[in-house]
Amino acid sequence: MLNKIKAHLDNIALAHSIFALPFAYMGAFLACKGIPPLKTLIFITLVMVSARSIALILDNLIDLRYDKQQKRLAHRPLVRGIIKPIELYVLIAFFFSVFFYSVVHLPRLCLYLSPLALAILWLYPYTKRFTFLCHYVLGIALAMAPIGGYMAVTGRISFPSLVLGTGVCFWIGTFD
C-alpha cells in the first residue's frame, strides 16, 4: 500500500506543486501589501496543489503512448504499470473536487475563471506535439499562479499582478 501511495506521489510530482506555490503566494502578498489571511492562503494552497496534480495526471495520461516509447521515461510509475489509468481517473475526480471546493471559498472571479485555468492545464500536453513554443503554454499556466493569488485576495485582476504573471510566463517559457 505504501509503495502504491509513493508511486502516485511520484506520478503527480508533488515537488512541482511546491515549486509553483511561491508564485501564487507572491500575488497574494502583493495584493495585501503584507500577509494575507490564513484562510485565504490555505485555499490558495489547496487550489494550487489540486490544479498542479490534475495537470500532471492529465499530462501523464495524455502522453502515455509516447512515454512508453521513450527510454528515459521508462521509470515512471504509469509507464511501468505500477499505477493503472483507472486509478488516475479516480484521482482526477478527487483533485477536481478539492479544486472546486477550494475555489468557491475565494472571490467569485476565481470561480468564473477556473474553467479557463483548467483548460490551459489540459491544453499543454497537446501543444508538445505541434509547437516548440509549448513551454510558453506551460509558462502561461504558471503565470496564472500570481494572478490567481492576487485575485484570491482582492477579487480582481490588476496591472501589477499581470506584470508579475508575465514575468513568470517568460521566465518559465525561456528557462524550460
Image (cartoon, rainbow, N blue to C red):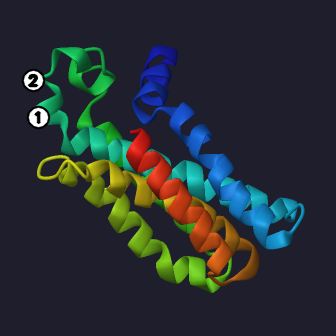
Tell me: residue 12, above or below residue 154.
above
Q: Is residue 139 visible?
A: yes
Amino acid type for the residue under numbered disc 2: Gln
- Classify 10 Å Cα crowding around label 2: few (below 14), some (14-19), many (20 and above): few
Please tell me which residue is depicted at 15% across the width and 21% down the height of the picture.
70
Kindly identify the residue that appears in the image at 61 percent across and 39 percent down: 18
Amino acid on which the number 1 mark rests in the picture: Arg
Q: Which residue is mark 1?
A: 65
Taking the image as shown, residue 11 lies to the left or right of residue 148, namely: left
Tell me the element at label 1: helix
CB atoms at circles 2 and 1 under 8 Å apart? yes
Q: Secondary structure at mark 2?
A: loop
Q: Position of residue 26 (x, y in %)?
A: 72, 57
Residue 103 shows up from this direction? no
Image point (33%, 67%), residue name: 119
| Residue identified by numbered label 2 | 69
Task: Depth check: give the residue in front, 148 or 174.
Answer: 174
How far apart, in angstroms, are the residues tagged by discs 2 and 1?
7 Å
The percent position of residue 22, horizontal first and vertical second, equals 68, 48
